[in-house]
Image (tube, helix red, strand yellow):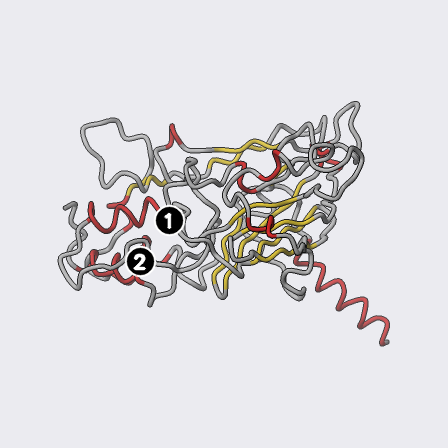
Amino acid sequence: MRNLILIFTLAISMSAFAAPFTNEGQLYESAPSGHTPGKDNHVTDSSNRFHHPGEDCGICHQPGVKGATGTTASDFTMSGTIYTDRTGRVPLQGAEIILRDVNGKVISMTSNEAGNFATKEAIGSDPATYAPGTDATSPGTWRYKSWVKYGDYVSPMVTIAPVGGMSAARMGCSMHHGPTGSRGALNVGGASTLISYPAENISYKQHIQPILLNRCKACHVPSDASPSATYPPAIGTTPASTVKYNGGLDLATYTPSTKTVISDKMISNMVNTTTPDSSKLLTTVVMGNTGHAGGAFWKTTDPDYTAIRRWISEGAKNN
């Protein structure tokens, strides 16, 4: 009987991993728990662990580039830099970067004083990506779902990522998440976008738009400009899977105008001036809501949240 209970318990614990390892299947998966944060950190006593924050670590830290030929002393399977916001103003120390591969293996890194993190842990190879002439040793078959955490804040990567370089073991978050790139720096947490907000007369252009640019612009732009990602499914069975990040919501545009409307919803569709607390602009990404593939951005006490709520209560003016 005890063995049956153990088997049943194991089945329950594995059920969190049971969704298909596809973009759609993993879209709302929760971050893994029960492991030691930072257990897979690449640890070094060298001051170099604080160098070049925000740059693409994989340019140098890949096989055969750093160190003697054939060595793995400087080869990283994942690395990068994390900040308090997408502009990369302030490095974030103590954030956790979590990867879970196709085999359910959990890899955890924590960021240092420069916001840098790195690991050498192997990432599982996904048989669904095998093509003629490739096998599990090909970096293009390594895939993972990822999350970043800081305290209560959790931000998932919407899609399942393949190896960044495709032809070499080059893995790095900063390949796509840089301070000056369209997706902005890798970030997590409830830090205020602006230094302060006024107690009244909140301006859309001066106060709210900067918050939306910081929090939402990486995904929620007009449909024809919406970033997307296409990943291969099982070879020879089904078409490639493409995910468009904006989900039909444009948070770069306040309201429809005489110009062609190319998104289903805009900012004005996401506010409720009668009952501000029910506005989807707030509730969709508030802590505790699991219905947003991009995670929760703020608590109801965070400065960005209170500024948006005050703006809505004042009529959500396009001022």
From the viewer's perspective, is residue 234 above or below residue 102? Answer: above
Q: Mark 1 or mark 2, which has the lower sequence index?
A: 1
Q: Residue at x 58, y 33 (%)?
A: 241
Residue nearer the viewer, 126 or 289: 126
Q: Position of residue 206 (x, y in %)?
A: 20, 48
Type of amino acid under label 2:
Asp
From the viewer's perspective, is residue 140 above or below residue 211? Answer: above
Residue 292 - label? none
Residue 215 - label? 1
Q: Give the secondary structure at mark 2.
A: helix
Residue nearer the viewer, 57 or 293: 57
Q: Residue at x 38, y 64 (%)?
A: 299
Q: Position of residue 153 (x, y in %)?
A: 47, 61
- Residue at which label 2 appears: 304
Q: Position of residue 179 (x, y in %)?
A: 43, 41
Q: How many other residues sit within 10 Å of disc 1, few (<14), some (14-19) or many (≥20)?
A: many
Tell me the quarter of the picture where residue 126 sits: top right
Q: Residue furthest bottom?
A: 2
Tell me the quarter of the picture where residue 17 sits: bottom right
Q: Position of residue 316 (x, y in %)?
A: 19, 52
Please say if the residues under marks 1 and 2 sit with CB atoms less than 8 Å apart.
yes
Q: Residue at x 53, y 59 (%)?
A: 95
Q: Residue at x 78, y 33 (%)?
A: 69
Q: Determine the CA span between mark 1 and mark 2.
A: 10 Å
